[in-house]
Amino acid sequence: MEFLDAPPLPFYFSPDHEQFRASLREFIAREITPFVNEWDEAETFPRSLYQRAAEMGVLGLNYPEEYGGTPADLFYQIVVAEEFARCGCGGVQASLNSHSIALPPILVAGSETLKRRVLPPVLAGQKIAALAVTEPSGGSDVASLRTTAIRDGDHYVVNGEKTFITSGIRADFITTAVRTDPASKGAGGISVLVIDGDTPGLTRTPLKKMGWWSSDTAHLRFDNCRVPVTHLVGEENHGFKTFMNNFNSERLFMSALACGMAEVCLKESVDWTRQRISFGAPLSERQVVRHKLMDMTLRIDAARTLVYDLTYRIQHQLDDPARLVARVCLAKVQATQAMQFCADQAVQLLGGMGYMRGTQSERIYREVKVMMIGGGSEEVMKDLAARQLGV
């Protein structure tokens, strides 16, 4: 089925994009894919992979050269998402790329001193960065967060909890959402602090998960952690918008990743049904099976077309910002629903093998829900989109 590898559209992906894609594909096939089963069972992967990914140029994409990065457009991020999906293991990419949601607030609003301290070692793969927003009491509802940071001289005293934090155990820098004005409610009084991983009073507990086994996921507790005021990102009490803007890029990346994961399920299904002989003929010759494969293809194409179109519109500022936010939310819903459908159909088509650990479809089936929940659940996405569109 050659249609599974359609040629890139030139107004989306340039020859430079495709050259980078080819190099990244070879890197992932050599350095990651052969080991994902082992890493999943071990619930971790080697820390050295960060430095190798940095040398490949993955970690520094879309960051200024003065911090060790490489300026790049949004379609390079789409390439990263699509190629990492090929290994069929979301846990590796989740932790390896956790800096992509932890560093943007620092890059946009941090002091030059803070940028120089954090960005270069993370982009070089020497340090790990995490984002800590979600709390046990309010999920991803930033306006309801309870973790406080009270000014005490040259420090903030931080108390509270964060949960479901990707790279939470190993992170050297934690970009944290805190309430610096406890009297404020809702979006007011929220700030961004960078908290060092070795700060006294910070305890980290690993979490067991349905999927993303190889990803480092943690519950964090801050008990009178003293954080220098110089670690404040942007203006005190005005951090809410920073986090909201950060979510948009995360959701777009997740949409592209979900399309890629769905395609992995489709490809494994095609390979299996061609090889599997049932009642004297390959499964792929059965009409009901062919219909399932085409249903999968239809959903992938629809979701991916939306993601590409939306990325182009964002890059060229071709729509109202509120409408773009709404469409990003809906793209994540569309793409993760496609991933869910394809994972379910793939496991069904593989039969008993689809239920066995070691197949890509089995792993992706376990990882569907974190993609549908992470960055904002389907229900939150639809509600946010409706509000952005004035519904």
Image (tube, rainbow, N blue to C red):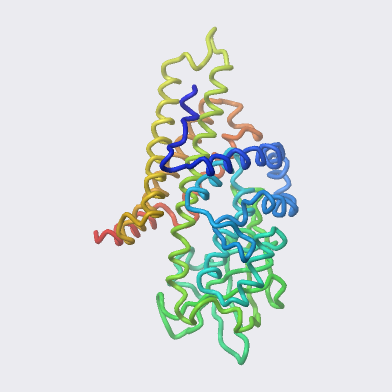
Work out whether residue 359 can be spotted: yes
Residue 70, image x, y percentages: 59, 57
Left or right of 327? Residue 174 is: right
Query: In this view of the protein, which residue sits in the foreground, 302 or 107?
Result: 107
Q: How many marks?
A: 0
Residue 180 placement (x, y as % from top left): 51, 82
Q: Nearer the viewer, residue 371 or 19?
A: 19
The image shows residue 172, relative to residue 331, as above or below, that is below
How far across and how far down the image is residue 202, in percent? 68, 73
Toward which corner of the image does residue 66 lie, by quadrant?
bottom right
Left or right side of 37 for 178: left
Which residue occupies the extreme left position in the image? 391
Which residue occupies the foreground of this view, 245 or 261?
245
Left or right for 338, reference 206: left
Quarter residue 201 falls in: bottom right
Of all residues shown, which one is farthest toward the top? 280
Q: Nearer the viewer, residue 52 or 262?
A: 52
Name the residue located 44 percent from the left edge and 20 percent from the top edge.
290
Locate the C terminus and report the quarter of the image it occupies. Answer: bottom left
- Is residue 193 rendered to the left or right of residue 198? left
Please report the residue visible at 63 percent of the width from the left and 40 percent of the height from the top.
23
Q: Residue 227, how many percent across, how many down?
A: 64, 81
Residue at the far bottom: name it: 153
Whether 229 is drawn above or below 121: the answer is: below
**Residue 205 in view (yes/no):** no
Picture layout, residue 245 above or below residue 50: below
Query: In the displayed structure, would residue 262 be above or below residue 176?
Result: above
